[in-house]
């Protein structure tokens, strides 16, 4: 099987799940969609908590010492947040969602603009609400699909030629998640296939060039940081706080670098 097959499968399940969920969501009342979103938020919070406990992994403690793992996670989030906010990752991701939305609905937007009077204002307001919903679905789904450990580890394994079992599992999970997300957040969820292709494709390439397995301590650090990012996504879904999770994404790269640095200084 060719390298990258796991990511192709993942993209396909996201698109199929979105198509099913969006059609289903159109038939659901707003209250039901809100309940679905709350359920997704609680489930994402659970997944985040399960991943965060990787900070206690023995491999990480042996590599950096018993007291350092939490500090490494903290340092990763601080460094990642600084870099991400300076680069404007969150803004760029939202802008990408807006561009995709406009590209897909250019004709309907032109028709709405051409409509005169109060009807035109109502159409423009509806178009704005639809755009915001599309961007919310795109950003939320992109973060959930890209920050989990399976996205990184599965892509690395694919690139290393170790098989696509992990990405196959992720593809199945993302497919079902897409049904639920799209039922609540609409077609923007399907556009998340683009960042999934970019992120997982990049890690697959890294795996192909790396030629060896990433140390367990580095994986544990990335998993713990990714878990906290998922908690941030859950807070957004539960409408508790709009944590700029995308700005924190560079923390996933900072984590293994800090592990290597602390290990070298010991």
Image (tube, rainbow, N blue to C red):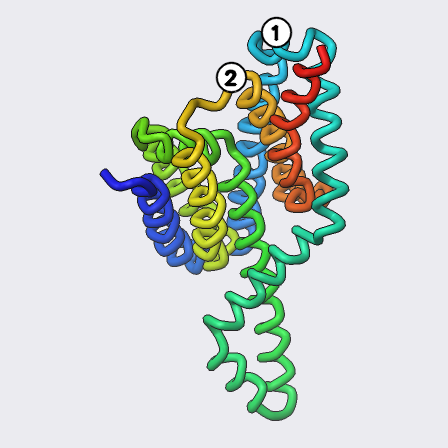
60 shown above or below 161: above
| Cα–Cα gap, marks 1 and 2 | 10 Å
Q: Which residue is drawn at 43% across and 22% down?
A: 213
**Mark 2 surroundings within 10 Å by alpha-carbon count, few (fewer than 14), some (14 through 19), many (20 or more):** some
Taking the image as drawn, is residue 58 in sight? Answer: yes
| Whole-percent x, y for residue 76 in the image | 70, 30
Q: Residue at x 71, y 41 (%)?
A: 240
Q: Which residue is drawn at 42% across and 41% down?
A: 205
- Count of numbered circles on the image: 2
Return the residue at label 2. 216
Q: Earlier in the sequence, mark 1 or mark 2?
A: 1
Taking the image as drawn, is residue 183 in sight? Answer: no
| Whole-percent x, y for residue 218 in the image | 57, 22
Return the residue at label 1. 62
Secondary structure beneath disc 1? helix
| Whole-percent x, y for residue 230 in the image | 60, 34
Q: Which residue is drawn at 50% across and 51% down?
A: 184
Q: In this view, does 38 lie to the left or right of 145?
A: right
The residue lying toward the viewer, choosing from 260 and 17, is 260
Q: In this view, does 111 lie to the left or right of 45?
A: left
| Whole-percent x, y for residue 125 in the image | 63, 75
Q: In which quarter of the image is the N terminus?
A: top left
């Amino acid at each position: 099987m060719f390298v990258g097959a796991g990511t192709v499968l993942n993209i396909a399940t996201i698109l199929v799940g979105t198509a099913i969920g969006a059609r289903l969501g159109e038939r659901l009342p707003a209250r039901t969609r809100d309940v679905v979103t709350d359920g997704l938020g609680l489930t994402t919070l659970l997944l985040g908590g399960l991943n965060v406990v990787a900070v206690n992994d023995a491999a990480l403690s042996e590599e950096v010492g018993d007291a350092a793992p939490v500090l490494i996670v903290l340092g990763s989030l601080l460094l990642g947040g600084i870099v991400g906010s300076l680069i404007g990752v969150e803004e760029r991701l939202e802008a990408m969602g807006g561009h995709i939305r406009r590209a897909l609905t250019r004709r309907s937007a032109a028709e709405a603009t051409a409509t005169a009077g109060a009807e035109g204002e109502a159409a423009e307001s509806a178009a704005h609400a639809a755009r915001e919903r599309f961007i919310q679905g795109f950003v939320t789904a992109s973060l959930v699909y890209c920050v989990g450990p399976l996205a990184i580890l599965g892509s690395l394994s694919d690139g290393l030629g170790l098989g696509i079992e992990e990405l196959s599992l992720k593809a199945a999970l993302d497919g079902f998640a897409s049904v639920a997300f799209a039922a609540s957040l609409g077609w923007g969820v399907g556009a998340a296939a683009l960042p999934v292709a970019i992120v997982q494709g990049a890690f697959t390439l890294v795996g192909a060039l790396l030629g060896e397995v990433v140390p367990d301590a580095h994986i544990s650090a990335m998993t713990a940081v990714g878990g906290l990012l998922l908690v941030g996504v859950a807070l957004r879904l539960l409408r508790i706080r709009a944590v700029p999770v995308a700005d924190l994404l560079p923390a996933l790269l900072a984590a293994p670098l800090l592990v290597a640095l602390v290990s070298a200084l010991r």
